[in-house]
């Protein structure tokens, strides 16, 4: 009898112990699950691109690749919310609201008007500028070395003086340059001033052709083609978006185009001294990763490129009957076709 009682007690203790053990095991496995969650937390990056043109598309690609290289991978620990404003101010405003409301951890504005729309929407979430020509002039940061607020990023400021000089070297007989740009883009204003100063210094007459919208491009290029020896285009999104039209019209009168960017040379510009667009995107993406990892935008200086490379379209030069100096040809990167 006594023994039976003892056995029952032992059995009971045993059962209780198993119960406690099972409970503990369950609890700790829950714990590892939530620990895992912390490590694989998904970050949301909200990207707003102003419009589609080859340069901005390449920048976007660079951003995504750099994030991947920094360990942020879509489907794992990264969610990219992407919006394209299609060059429409009211769309940019609504899309900015949406990106903020989608719990983005960080926002990226590709091109000035997109960055400005984001900046008007939040003063708290970090914003990284993707290829904003003049962040101070566009009222986005106080100082390029100490941005101060929630915004920092990458500027693609181009060497306008060197680009104009390249034009005079390729076209030694040129007397007049026509600058084509959109009157609504803050990013172009700065560069038009720089280019004007540089051109006048070199003894060129400068005619400026600001256009209010895409609708005026064809006619403006037709008019200017009769009045200028070459066309100069700054980092202007509206013109970049309509580059095939610009080239088509200018080619009718065989007027060369000096651009500010490799992609526009590829599309039929004659040449530029510029920065590879994909590389601009990579720098932007690296900065996004740094901030996700804890860097403070207020104390992160704006990244600017020191040097551009000579980029020429040999096929276009041949079409226009332009001889590229041997020395220049040696240094240049040739894009836009096969006529080498
Ligand atoms: N820098 C332009 C801006 O601030 C954007 C841009 C980047 C761009 N690459 C370009 C514009 C090439 C025209 C062509 O908005």
Image (spheres, grey):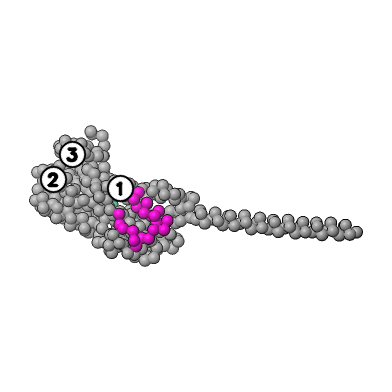
Front of the two marks 3 and 2: 3
How far apart, in angstroms, are the residues tagged by discs 2 and 1?
Answer: 25 Å
Determine whether the residue tagged by mark 3 lies in a helix, strand or loop: helix
| Residue labelled with disc 1 | 277
Q: Are marks 3 and 2 in contact (CB under 8 Å)?
A: no
Residue at the location (70% across, 56% down)?
Answer: 21
Of label 3 and label 2, which has the lower sequence position? 2
How far apart, in angstroms, are the residues tagged by discs 1 and 3?
Answer: 22 Å
Residue 184's place in the image compared with 316, above or below, is: below
Q: Where is residue 12 shown, x and y percent of the image?
A: 79, 59
Q: Is residue 134 left or right of residue 229?
A: right
Q: Where is residue 107 shown, x and y percent of the image?
A: 39, 58
Residue at the location (27% across, 47% down)?
Answer: 275
On whether ligand 1 comes within 8 Å of the CB at mark 1, the answer is yes
Specify the segment rendered in magenta: 279-303
Determine whether the residue tagged by mark 2 lies in a helix, strand or loop: helix
Determine whether the residue tagged by mark 1 lies in a helix, strand or loop: helix
Is-magenta flag for residue 283?
A: yes
Of label 2 and label 1, which has the lower sequence position? 2
Q: Is residue 58 left or right of residue 24?
A: left
Q: Quadrant of residue 112?
A: bottom left
Pick whichever, 48 or 85, lies toward us.
48
| Residue labelled with disc 3 | 328
Residue at the location (73% across, 56% down)?
Answer: 18
Q: Would you say the magenta stretch is mainly helix, strand or loop? A: helix
| Residue labelled with disc 2 | 168
């Amino acid at each position: 009898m006594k023994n039976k009682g003892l056995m029952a007690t032992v059995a009971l203790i045993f059962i209780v112990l198993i119960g406690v053990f099972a409970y503990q095991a369950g609890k700790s496995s829950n714990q590892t699950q939530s620990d895992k969650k912390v490590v694989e937390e998904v970050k949301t990056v909200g990207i707003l691109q102003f419009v589609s043109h080859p340069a901005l598309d390449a920048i976007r690609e660079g951003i995504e690749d750099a994030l991947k290289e920094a360990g942020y991978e879509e489907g794992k620990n990264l969610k990219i919310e992407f919006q394209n404003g299609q060059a429409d101010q009211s769309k940019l405003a609504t899309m900015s609201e949406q990106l903020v409301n989608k719990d983005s951890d960080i926002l990226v504005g590709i091109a000035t008007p997109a960055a400005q729309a984001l900046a008007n929407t939040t003063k708290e979430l970090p914003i990284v500028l993707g290829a904003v020509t003049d962040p101070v002039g566009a009222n986005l940061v106080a100082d390029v070395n100490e941005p101060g607020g929630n915004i920092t990023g990458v500027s693609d400021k181009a060497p306008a003086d060197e680009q104009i000089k390249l034009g005079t070297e390729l076209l030694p007989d040129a007397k007049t340059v026509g600058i084509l740009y959109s009157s609504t883009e803050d990013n172009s204003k700065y560069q038009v001033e720089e280019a004007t100063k540089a051109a006048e210094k070199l003894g060129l007459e400068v005619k400026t052709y600001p256009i209010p919208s895409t609708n005026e491009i064809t006619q403006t290029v037709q008019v200017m083609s009769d009045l200028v020896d070459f066309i100069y285009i700054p980092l202007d999104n509206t013109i970049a978006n309509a580059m095939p039209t610009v080239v088509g019209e200018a080619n009718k009168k065989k007027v060369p185009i000096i651009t500010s960017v490799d992609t526009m040379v590829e599309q039929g510009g004659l040449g530029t001294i510029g920065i590879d667009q994909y590389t601009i995107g990579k720098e932007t993406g690296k900065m996004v990763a740094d901030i996700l990892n804890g860097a403070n935008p207020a104390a992160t200086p704006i990244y600017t490129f020191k040097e551009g490379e000579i980029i020429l379209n040999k096929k276009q030069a041949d079409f226009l009957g332009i001889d590229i100096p041997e020395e220049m040809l040696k240094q240049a990167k040739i894009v836009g076709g096969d006529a080498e």
